[in-house]
Image (spheres, grey):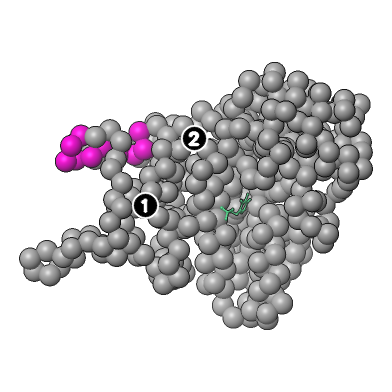
């Protein structure tokens, strides 16, 4: 009953909706049980019943959620962590001492801060590349190339296929922060990437109520085995209840992502020539510098992430966020409710972002309510 449906033949929307046909073989429950147990008994021969018998190394609910993500990303295996940061810092832990890392100058600031911290400690050498300049940043000693596409919060698009070719030419691994792609619109492993990362806190869960991160690999190789072993030793796997909530969230991933993409595209078009705005940054707009790559690479919507650059000061852009009545002034992204954030306030005085940039995570509301909300807030600044 549980495994008579070949997932190879099924389309991703079906795999998601059925949570990989997670029927409980004992009861036929359509929604799988949560295995909260921290420990699993051995059998009469003192042999373990499961591949891991202590929750820090793994558990059945975790494996179920991981299999679902592996199927969606068309990878070989996945590892779920207690947060996005826990996942990516564990990957960085596998960089050999003193090796060279290449990463974008503009990206999720938590990742950039962590890489800079590793560089300050003499753990790695780091080259941050300006958009489109990966080739120039590579060295024969480069171990890891990290990209984020579309990147926070400018939404520039990186050609994954090209990045993989360049990274592989010097023997480096290409890892892609695919958080804003949601495992829906671009599958980096099919374009040559070696590892995909998601903050599963965002689109994968989609309901702003789970903190989680995931790595997905194209090959189960020694580096992957090391990451898996580190997760067990560091004690950072995702807890069973969060795994279960994440699976529930992922069942509706494709409809959520489609609605968010449609809403964001409509908003981007509506506001692209607005008198109170300097610019709208959204890869779905023909005027966006990354649009040509996006059209090729984002095959199932341009996502719900966009930024507005206001004709206004730091203070006015911050105020804009407080004037919104539907869109919530909060950090994070990828949830069903729209959020607005003045990124420079959040990143602090060292931020190199424009004063007038407001990042929007567009949700699944009726788009007319979002248009009206942004219009009324712009009128007030
Ligand atoms: C949120 C986020 C992270 C960090 O993930 P957490 O789940 O918050 O630890 C990394 N990259 C991107 C693009 C993110 O949006």
User: Which residue carries the number 2 mark?
Assistant: 253
In space, the residues marked 1 and 2 are separated at their CA atoms by 20 Å
Q: In this orientation, does residue 81 appear?
A: yes
Does 188 sit above or below residue 381? below
- The verdict on residue 19 being magenta is yes
Q: Which residue is drawn at 53% across and 62% down?
A: 86
Is residue 290 shown left or right of residue 57? right
Q: Earlier in the sequence, mark 1 or mark 2?
A: 1
Does 95 sit above or below residue 261? below
Image: magenta residue range: 18-28
Can you tell which mark lies on residue 195? none
Query: Circle 1 — which element?
Result: helix
Q: Do the residues labelled 1 and 2 touch (CB within 8 Å)?
A: no
- Residue 21 horizontal/vertical position (percent): 30, 36
- The verdict on residue 353 being magenta is no
User: Which residue carries the number 1 mark?
Assistant: 240
Task: State the residue in front, 66 or 367.
Answer: 367
């Amino acid at each position: 009953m549980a495994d008579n449906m070949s997932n190879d033949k099924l389309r991703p929307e079906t795999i998601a909706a059925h949570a990989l046909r997670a029927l409980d073989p004992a009861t036929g429950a359509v929604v799988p049980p949560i295995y909260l147990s921290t420990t699993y008994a051995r059998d009469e021969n003192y042999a373990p019943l499961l591949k891991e018998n202590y929750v820090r190394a793994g558990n059945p609910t975790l494996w179920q959620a991981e299999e679902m993500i592996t199927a969606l990303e068309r990878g070989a295996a996945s590892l779920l962590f207690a947060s996005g940061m826990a996942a990516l810092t564990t990957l960085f832990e596998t960089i050999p001492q003193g090796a060279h890392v290449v990463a974008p100058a503009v990206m999720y600031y938590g990742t950039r801060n962590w890489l800079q911290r590793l560089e300050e400690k003499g753990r790695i050498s780091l080259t941050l590349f300006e958009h489109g300049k990966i080739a120039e940043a590579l060295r024969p000693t480069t171990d890891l190339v990290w990209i984020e596409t579309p990147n926070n919060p400018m939404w520039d698009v990186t050609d994954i296929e090209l990045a993989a070719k360049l990274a592989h030419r010097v023997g480096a691994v290409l890892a892609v922060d695919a958080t804003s792609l949601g495992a829906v619109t671009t599958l980096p492993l099919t374009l040559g990437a070696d590892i995909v990362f998601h903050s599963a806190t965002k689109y994968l869960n989609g309901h702003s109520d789970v903190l989680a991160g995931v790595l997905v690999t194209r090959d189960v190789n020694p580096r992957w085995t090391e990451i898996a072993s580190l997760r067990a030793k560091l004690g950072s796997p995702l807890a069973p209840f969060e795994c279960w909530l994440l699976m529930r969230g992922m069942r509706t991933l494709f409809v959520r992502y489609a609605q968010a993409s449609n809403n964001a595209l409509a908003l981007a078009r509506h506001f692209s020539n607005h008198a109170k705005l300097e610019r709208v940054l959204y890869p779905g707009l023909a005027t966006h510098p990354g649009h040509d790559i996006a059209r090729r690479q984002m095959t199932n919507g341009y996502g719900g992430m966009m930024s507005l650059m206001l004709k206004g000061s730091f203070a006015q852009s911050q105020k804009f966020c407080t004037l919104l009545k539907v869109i919530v002034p909060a950090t994070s992204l990828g949830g069903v409710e729209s959020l607005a954030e003045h990124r420079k306030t959040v990143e602090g005085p060292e931020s190199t972002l424009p004063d007038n940039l407001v990042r929007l995570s567009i949700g699944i509301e009726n788009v007319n309510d979002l248009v009206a909300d942004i219009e009324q807030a712009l009128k007030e600044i």
